[in-house]
Image: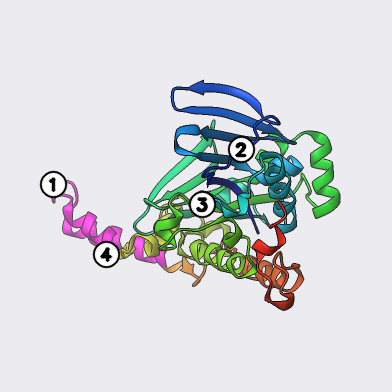
Amino acid sequence: MNLDYIEVTQFTGKDKPNLEYLQREAFYPNAERYSFQGCKKIEIWNFPERNQLSIKGSFPYFLNGHNYNSSTEDWKEGIDYLSSCLNLNLYLGLIEAFEFGTIQEISFPENAFLRNHVKIQGMEARSYQKGNVLTGKEFLSPSLKVKLYDSNRNIKQKLEKPIQEEITRLWGWDREKHYIKLENHYKKPEVHFRGNLYLHEILSPEFQITLQWELYKTYQKIMKTGNVILPEKKADINAGTIPLIILKELESVYNFNTEELLRAKLKEISEELLSPADRKARLKILRENLKKISTSGRSEFDISELLKAKIQQQDNTDTPFIYEKKGEEILTQISKI
């Protein structure tokens, strides 16, 4: 689990940033757009009249060319380097937006996983497809965007072969397996966390732990299907039971009772088409088919336990970014920048 994309605003005051290491991209009436080249570019906006600099991009991509995995030490290296080039202390920058997420190996195809993650109560849901293949979903509120997408597809299509080989060597990525990316994109962190956040704060061990458990809790809020136990006999999975299987999966998500819904629909059909005896006969068949279907309390596509295990493992193995000796704060480490 790690930070990825970030937007930081640095107020320069009387200090003038050093822009000579940047590549000039465009000029506007009140702004200048630059880029800083690493493995991938970081975008930098200069607003001279406001004494303000904005940095936008992914430090994992900037440093390593991918976001499969990155540590707080990677972030420190990238921020130190960029701070020294700009002659500014970027750790004091105000966070405007950022992403925190993880890539998780799963035991089933990515599109099946995505199809069975339906909605988060009170958030808008969006789906993304490539042709007929479902590749991603988003759940949106004014301050937060939750993203689920086919990570394996991105790695294969967007990363060059040497980087694919590197993440295989370092972290065991296997192109034949299935991987999903889960992200919390904090669009308005000051609203979500009820106060301004600064770069040095979100890199602290305490805040990293907060972000890990927030990601886990967000995932738990996603309503999932896939909790139906299929009939054991092939004959019981027929044209009559398959639609009922889908309805039973959707019951808990949309809060309805399948049998009551079917009974109500039969009552709506006029007696000219179906006599009372016809309705009774059809309801009997429906009830017989429903008896063939049972549900478990949890979706087979639920990866909550895998995420929890990853958090617990990371808590035990991560090296803290902030040195705790003598209660030193992060700012003392970068005072020489």
Q: Secondary structure at mark 4?
A: helix
N-term mark: 3 or 1: 3
Q: Nearer the viewer, mark 2 or mark 3?
A: 2
Residue 261 lies, in percent from the top left, at 27, 60
> Do callouts 3 and 4 mark residues in contact (Cβ within 8 Å)?
no
> What is the three-letter code of the residue carrying label 3?
Leu
> What is the three-letter code of the residue carrying label 1?
Glu
> Do callouts 2 and 4 mark residues in contact (Cβ within 8 Å)?
no
Query: How crowded is the residue under tag 1: few (<14 C-alpha within 10 Å), some, or many (20+)?
Result: few
Instruction: Please give the name of the residue rendered at 13% of the width and 51% of the height, measured from the top-left corner.
Output: 271
Whole-number angstrom distance, CA of label 2 to CA of label 4: 68 Å
> What is the three-letter code of the residue carrying label 2?
Pro
Residue 154 among magenta residues: no
Whole-number angstrom distance, CA of label 1 to CA of label 2: 82 Å
Horizontal side, residue 83 vs residue 13: left or right? right
Residue 47 visible within the image: yes
Give the residue number, with chain letter if any, for mark 2. 17
Give the residue number, with chain letter if any, for mark 4. 260
N-term mark: 3 or 4: 3
Q: Nearer the viewer, mark 1 or mark 4?
A: 4
Residue 241 lies, in percent from the top left, at 44, 56
